[in-house]
Amino acid sequence: MVSLKAQNILERYPEVFEIKKSIDNNESLQPVILENDDFTDDSLDGGGEVIGFYNSTTQEIKKISITLFLSYGIQRYSFYLKNEKLVLVMDKFKQFDYDKELNKFDDQNFDGGFIGTYIFNDNRLIDHISLGHKRFEDDSIDIEETFLKELDFYSKKISEALND
């Protein structure tokens, strides 16, 4: 499901919207699933999963979806690719409610988070919209550079799994 704000930005980029729709509806794409130790040396509080969706004939990766279960919330984001170039990132974080009496996060209830939609052209960030407290609130963090590094990292992990 796409939020209204994300939908509005995607309406300004109909080609990107069509790429997303085409990838999401393409049942012929094959998944490769990586869990925890397959993609990180760090210990994730609740684990994590990376799913790469690829064309089995060409082994071209079309989409990478990441889910990270953290002690303070759930991070989900997806990279959409066309000709191995980044065109779209859909990013969502749901923060757990903090129970002050117990002095810990309550993983059964959510309190805040963010959603972001990031449009790329030829691996360059050209537009974005985000709502809520996000990981890029600190202006010193380069959104484009961060996503491209993450994409490179996850793409390599998926390619390694495909070649095993």
Image: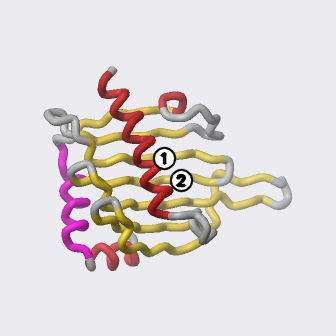
Task: Specify which label sits upstream in the sequence, 2 or 1.
Answer: 1
The residue shown at (19%, 39%) is 55
Residue 139 position within the rendered picture, expressed as x and y whole percent measured from the top left: 60, 71
Q: Which residue is mark 1?
A: 67
Q: Residue furthest top?
A: 164
- Left or right, 54 with respect to 58, comes to right
Residue 1 position within the rendered picture, expressed as x and y whole percent measured from the top left: 35, 63
- Left or right, 104 with respect to 118, comes to right
- Left or right, 107 with respect to 90, comes to right
Residue 36 position within the rendered picture, expressed as x and y whole percent measured from the top left: 53, 33
Q: Nearer the viewer, residue 112 or 115?
A: 115
Instruction: Sort mark 1 into few (<14), some (14-19) or many (20+) by Cα contacts within 10 Å.
Output: some
The residue shown at (48%, 46%) is 67
Q: Amino acid at mark 2?
A: Gln
Q: Is there a contact, CB below 8 Å, between mark 2 and mark 1?
A: yes
Instruction: Sort mark 2 into few (<14), some (14-19) or many (20+) by Cα contacts within 10 Å.
Output: some
**What coloring was used for the rendering?**
secondary structure
The residue shown at (63%, 69%) is 138
Q: Which residue is mark 2?
A: 75
Q: Is 45 above or below relative to 137?
A: above
Q: Is 34 above or below relative to 101?
A: above
17 part of magenta stretch: yes
Magenta: predominant secondary structure element? helix
Label 2 sits on a secondary structure element that is strand
Magenta segment range?
13-27
- Left or right, 151 with respect to 37, comes to left
Q: Amino acid at mark 1?
A: Thr
88 part of magenta stretch: no
CA distance separating discs 2 and 1: 6 Å
The residue shown at (29%, 36%) is 31
Label 1 sits on a secondary structure element that is strand
